[in-house]
Amino acid sequence: MDSSLKGIAVVIMGVSGAGKSTIGEMLAKVTNCSFLDADDYHPLSNKEKMHKGIPLSDEDRIPWLETLRDALQESLANGKIVILGCSALKKQYRNILRSADPNYELGRCASEVKFVLLDAKAEVLAARLENRAAEGKHFMPAKLLQSQLDSLQIDESEGIFKVDATLNPQTIVSTIYTWIFSSKVAQDSKNL
């Protein structure tokens, strides 16, 4: 592998209903890269639990996050940009994803894995989930939203980029795109 190649992974994060898949897919098209939907990586047992309204435990999530980390690691190793839509609710979970970067140091937030939080009020999220459920488009019921909101931990020191998830999707994508490439250019110029 060419060591000058620098990949970057952007995790579009937030609770269910925030728009991770929609925004992630749109951003991947704009950046001409792969989009990974974390929901596709859940084992059947996790999907069944959520479908029954049972919140996932750390024991359910850790192997799933490690699988996602491995997928990110492959893209980073090949110098590619990859977009991942993933709840990444806790710092512990984000650290697992950050470890896809071979230069990541545990406890530090500097990594080629960047996080964008799609932020919206609970009422907006609940309405989105109810609409999605009525259309039969997702396995997670709206009643699990509160458990996700309760689990969401954001530490300001992590440098997570927050975007208002109620904005027009094109505006959200444009905002994230500008942030990714302005921070990537700044990082690359430091490495010259």
Image (spheres, grey):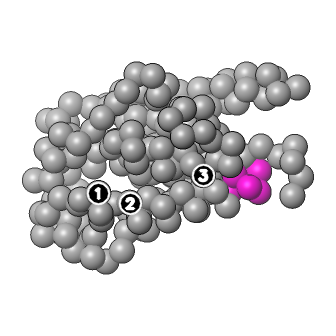
- List the residue tagged with mark 3: 100
Mark 3 or mark 1, which has the lower sequence index? Answer: 1
Q: Split into 4 quadrants, where in the image is the N terminus?
A: bottom right
Asked whether residue 30 is in view, the answer is no
Whole-number angstrom distance, CA of label 3 to CA of label 2:
14 Å
Residue 44 placement, left or right of 158: left
Whole-number angstrom distance, CA of label 3 to CA of label 1:
19 Å
Few, some or many C-alpha atoms within 10 Å of disc 1 (few <14, some 14-19, many ≥20)?
A: few
Question: Which residue occupies 30% across, 35% down?
Answer: 153
Question: Which residue occupies 40% across, 34% down?
Answer: 117
- List the residue tagged with mark 1: 58
- List the residue tagged with mark 2: 62
Q: Are the residues tagged 1 and 2 within 8 Å (C-beta)?
A: yes
Q: Are the residues tagged 3 and 2 within 8 Å (C-beta)?
A: no
Residue type pointed to by label 2:
Ile
Residue type pointed to by label 3:
Ala
x and y percentages locating residue 22 in the rendered image = 42, 49
SS class, disc 3:
loop
SS class, disc 2:
helix
x and y percentages locating residue 29 in the rendered image = 61, 50
Is 4 magenta? The answer is no
Asked whether residue 47 is in view, the answer is yes
Whole-number angstrom distance, CA of label 1 to CA of label 2:
6 Å
Q: Which residues are magenta?
A: 75-79
Question: Which residue occupies 27% across, 32% down?
Answer: 120
Q: How many marks?
A: 3
Mark number for residue 160? none
